DNA sequence: CAGAGCTCCTGAATGC
DNA sequence: TGCATTCAGGAGCTCT
């Protein structure tokens, strides 16, 4: 599933092919995605790409005729390929570029979204987003300020977009494990000290992942980038029943906020002893 | 306002 | 072998 690092990697990967190019046409084969694809997209003929940016997991393509705002959902991919490449199943959108290439959006589960706005900042969806996890605004103090008065489980808080964006299920699980914090712990029981550990850990995990995203980057230049998402070294995510890498206790799983969560009951006790 | 639950969709995994 | 069922998963929206 494209997490923030994947989106960032995608952005960096396609940017060189798009910048200063004209979008000749936009072909929408399947408009029914998470939201109906914005018909305004089709008016972008001959729009020139000025640059790309990212906000949370949204990818923004700035043109002289407005901003295209895309989200890869959980199974979406964007690839630049030759404009003669035949469309495959689930290839929902093509942006035809004037260098005989296309930017193709492929998304089996259709959880993605493609919006348009004169200025991306005006989209309500983007305005409601919390801080970027890699920016300095996401600090221990910031997290503590928002956690101390909420009862929701820490893990849900970390995945709560109005507070901090881009921390997906995998990263929330892994970061909490690395900090020895139980994912079900009510947020208001987090101490400032916990936050001082957690925040840098989240940043570290995300940065590491972006670095590894270089691997993904290579694949996605290959037109048949059928390589799935590269597996990264995970400690607990998806490892129910396996031994904890630290203490060998069996990893347990628990559904929190409809999301599967993994943790070591010994390294991440719910009740803080001592 | 906080927070729980619902919903979109399809492929993979599991069950018979 | 094949059909039917179950589940995962990002995030906005609705309801309490």
Image (spheres, coloured by chain):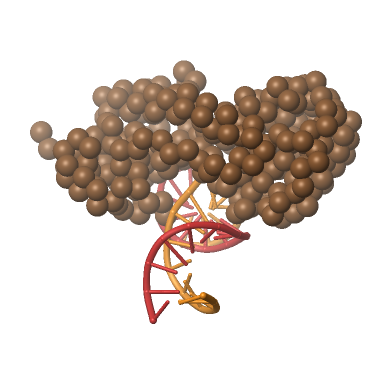
Chain colours: A brown, B red, C orange
In front of the other: A37 or A98:
A98
Tell me if residue A140 comes above or below residue A77 in the rendering: above
Quadrant placement of the C terminus of chain A:
top left
Tell me if residue A116 comes above or below residue A242 in the rendering: above
Question: A133 left or right of A30?
Answer: left
Which residue occupies 35% across, 54% down?
A255
Which residue occupies 41% across, 51% down?
A259
Task: Tally the numbered discs.
Answer: 0
Task: Residue A23: give x, y in percent of width and height.
Answer: 83, 32
Tell me if residue A28 comes above or below residue A5 in the rendering: below
Task: Residue A19: give x, y in percent of width and height.
Answer: 75, 22
Question: A25 left or right of A256?
Answer: right
Q: Residue furthest top?
A: A136
Task: Residue A113: give x, y in percent of width and height.
Answer: 67, 45
Q: Which image quadrant for residue A62?
A: top right
Question: A241 left or right of A91?
Answer: left
Q: Which image quadrant for residue A59?
A: top right
Which residue occupies 48% across, 32% down?
A164
Q: Which image quadrant for residue A53?
A: top right
Which residue occupies 61% across, 50% down?
A111
């Amino acid at each position: 599933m494209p997490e923030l690092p994947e989106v960032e990697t995608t952005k960096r990967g396609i940017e060189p092919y798009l910048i200063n190019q004209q979008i000749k046409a936009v072909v929408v084969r399947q408009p029914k995605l998470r939201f109906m694809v914005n018909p305004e997209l089709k008016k972008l003929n001959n729009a020139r790409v000025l640059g790309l940016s990212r906000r949370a997991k949204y990818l923004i393509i700035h043109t002289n005729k407005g901003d295209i705002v895309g989200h890869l959902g959980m199974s979406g991919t964007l690839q630049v390929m030759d404009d003669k490449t035949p469309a495959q199943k689930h290839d929902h959108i093509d942006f035809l570029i004037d260098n005989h290439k296309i930017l193709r959006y492929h998304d089996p589960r259709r959880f993605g979204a493609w919006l348009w706005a004169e200025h991306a900042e005006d989209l309500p969806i983007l305005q409601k987003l919390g801080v970027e996890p890699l920016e300095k605004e996401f600090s221990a103090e910031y997290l503590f300020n928002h956690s101390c008065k909420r009862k929701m489980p820490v893990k849900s808080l970390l995945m709560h977009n109005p507070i901090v964006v881009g921390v997906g299920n995998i990263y929330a699980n892994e970061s909490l494990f690395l900090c020895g914090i139980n994912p079900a712990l009510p947020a208001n029981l987090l101490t400032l000290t916990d936050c001082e550990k957690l925040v840098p850990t989240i940043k570290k995990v995300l940065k590491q992942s972006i670095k590894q995203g270089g691997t993904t980057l290579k694949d996605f230049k290959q037109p048949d980038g059928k390589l799935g998402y590269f597996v990264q070294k995970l400690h607990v995510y998806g490892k129910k029943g396996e031994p904890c890498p630290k203490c060998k206790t069996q990893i347990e799983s628990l559904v929190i906020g409809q999301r599967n969560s993994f943790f070591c009951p010994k390294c991440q006790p719910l009740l803080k002893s001592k």
